[in-house]
Amino acid sequence: MSILVIVEHDNQAVNVATLNTIAAAKEIGGDLHLLVAGENCGSVASAAAALDGAGKVLCADSAEYGHNLAENLAPLVSGIAGDYSHILAPATTFGKNVMPRIAALCDVPQISDIIEVIDSDTFKRPIYAGNALATVKSGDDLKIITVRSTAFEAVADTGGSAAIDALSSGGDKGLSSYDKSELSSSERPELTSANIVVSGGRGMQDGANFTMLESVADKLGAAVGASRAAVDAGFVPNDYQVGQTGKVVAPELYLAVGISGAIQHLAGMKDSKVIVAINKDEEAPIFQVADYGLVADLFDAVPEFDKEI
Amino acid sequence: MKILVPVKRVIDYNVKVRVKPDQSGVELANVKMAMNPFDEIAVEQALRIKEAGGAEEIVLVSIGPAQSQETIRTGLAMGADRGIYIEAGQDVEPLAVAKLLKAVVDKEAPGLVLCGKQAIDGDCNQTGQMLSALLGWSQGTFASGIEIAGDTAKIIREVDGGLEHISISMPCVVTVDLRLNEPRYASLPNIMKAKKKPIDALDAADLGVDTAPRLTLVKVEEPEARQAGIKVASVTELVDKLKNEAKVI
Ligand SMILES: Cc1cc2nc3c(=O)[nH]c(=O)nc-3n(C[C@H](O)[C@H](O)[C@H](O)COP(=O)(O)OP(=O)(O)OC[C@H]3O[C@@H](n4cnc5c(N)ncnc54)[C@H](O)[C@@H]3O)c2cc1C
């Protein structure tokens, strides 16, 4: 049995969610191959070869893979799918975009966002914003799976010494092209892998007030997140959104400030180890999941918290 | 151009779902149902494109139990022109849905299919991408901006790092994200008008699509509940607890 993990990267470095995905692959068990498709991605292929558990790296280095366009990447993967029992990718926007396209080309169902490997055919995944957990079993020879990174401990990025084989490119399908990115730049840790996350909601009232949270975050080495309401209101960019339809986080400490605790928000953070809520409404549902709740006006409490830590 | 918008009937997003005691699924009886919120955004976008002169007709399609026709009616009341209903169980897998939609696209020949990025019941986030693959079309996923000019659509995508701009060739499948628009409410006159708009029924078997599940649902269970926490009286107490009890800062 061979498993293929599709490496997410930006042609420079391996995205950490790949390491969690490899951990899930190792639980399934079998020979582990890693696919690096990109443009001038040789350094990524080398880094992938060194990942713990890597058996072989397949590298498709060509302009049409430079920006992860699904129309080009999916046929490359479906073309080699016959060699594998499982194909895995992280359940990031990268994986969510390309994996269903691969699954359809292979005519197999996809199992999205797994949080547990029961056996090589059977997986657990959240449904209904994590309010229920479904165990599903596949009878197909090939399983196409995306992996929730917070549910699997990342493997080490050292210890492997896999061979790198070149994979010939399938050409540009001419359906899509990349124009540009507007990436939020931040010195802070990445939201989904940060040890501490400080999130703000509608209660923050305005984007400028997020500087209060940023100050706390910088003292704690934390990432800054937000509720949908805060993103919709334009306080912070879209990539801050934590929740059912945003990012899923599970840090050691999650600080929810001015967030009511809607089901959709809880879906993205309720597996955090310690949850703190600061909210002036003592009835707010966020207090039902908080380990430590402080009923207070955030405009008093946050500056005070900032001073005391 | 014709726009096709698939719409799904799901448990209303405000409802706290309950798992059935026999672990066969979640309780759907006597539960408030509604159009999947992402599909509402897709319908709204289709209406805006039509209102701006970019489309002549908006066709809704729903696949599911008989009441899915009410979901089509909801979209017709928002302003869509007609509906197509395909009878099926509640839990048709995304791959089968994509195959049914492909059959509808083959009949209707739309220039654009607008889907929600995910349905909030199964949380799969698959159907639009699968449909696009089956059609051999381009895809624009998680869209917060769509601009169509001639045979190209410029899509702004919500991605993990921020926003990404791509250009894709028409016809295409676009899956919509939360920030694309704010869906309108149906006005009373439009609700009345919608009652007269046609909904045609199609049969999955006639379309040559096998909708039997490929995955076995072994069980559905409740997640482990979190232990109830405590309220602290002051910021000082909070900091003390985090430092000395939880030891996380
Ligand atoms: C399809 C769909 C998908 C969704 N996906 C997501 C998602 O991924 N993530 C997400 O977060 N939401 C999501 N939502 C939205 C969700 O339902 C809620 O609307 C949202 O989470 C509310 O955000 P909030 O808690 O910031 O705002 P509110 O619910 O308005 O809460 C604001 C809170 O701030 C408190 N507050 C106000 N002022 C102060 C003050 N001065 N001091 C202290 N506290 C104060 C209030 O007491 C209140 O509890 C989704 C909704 C839908 C329909």
Image (spheres, coloured by chain):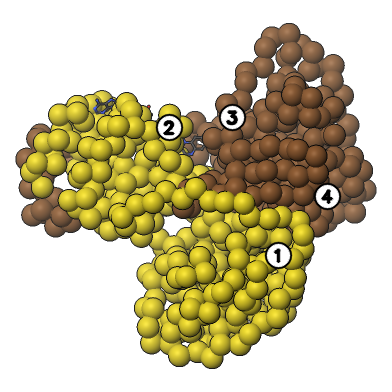
Q: Nearer the viewer, mark 3 or mark 2?
A: 2
In the rendered image, which residue does mark 2 sit on? A234
* Chain letter for the yellow colouring in the rendering: A
The Cα atoms of the two marked residues, 1 and 3, are separated by 29 Å
The Cα atoms of the two marked residues, 2 and 4, are separated by 37 Å
Residue A72: mark: 1
Tell me the crowding category of disc 1: few under 14, some 14 to 19, or many 20 or more residues within 10 angstroms, Cα based.
many
In the rendered image, which residue does mark 4 sit on? B102
Q: To which quarter of the image does residue A173 belong?
A: bottom right
In percent of width and height, residue B17 lies at 50, 39
Residue B181: mark: 3
Instruction: Provide the secondary structure element on which disc 3 rests.
Output: loop
Query: What amino acid type should be assigned to the residue bearing mark 2?
Result: Gly
Tell me the crowding category of disc 3: few under 14, some 14 to 19, or many 20 or more residues within 10 angstroms, Cα based.
some
Regarding residue A114, the answer to whether it shows in the image is no
Could you tell me which quadrant the C terminus of chain B lies in? Answer: bottom left
> Looking at the image, which is closer to me, A193 or A163?
A163
At 48% across and 78% down in the image, what residue appears?
Answer: A43
The Cα atoms of the two marked residues, 3 and 4, are separated by 26 Å
* Chain letter for the brown colouring in the rendering: B
Instruction: Provide the secondary structure element on which disc 4 rests.
Output: helix
Residue A160: mark: none
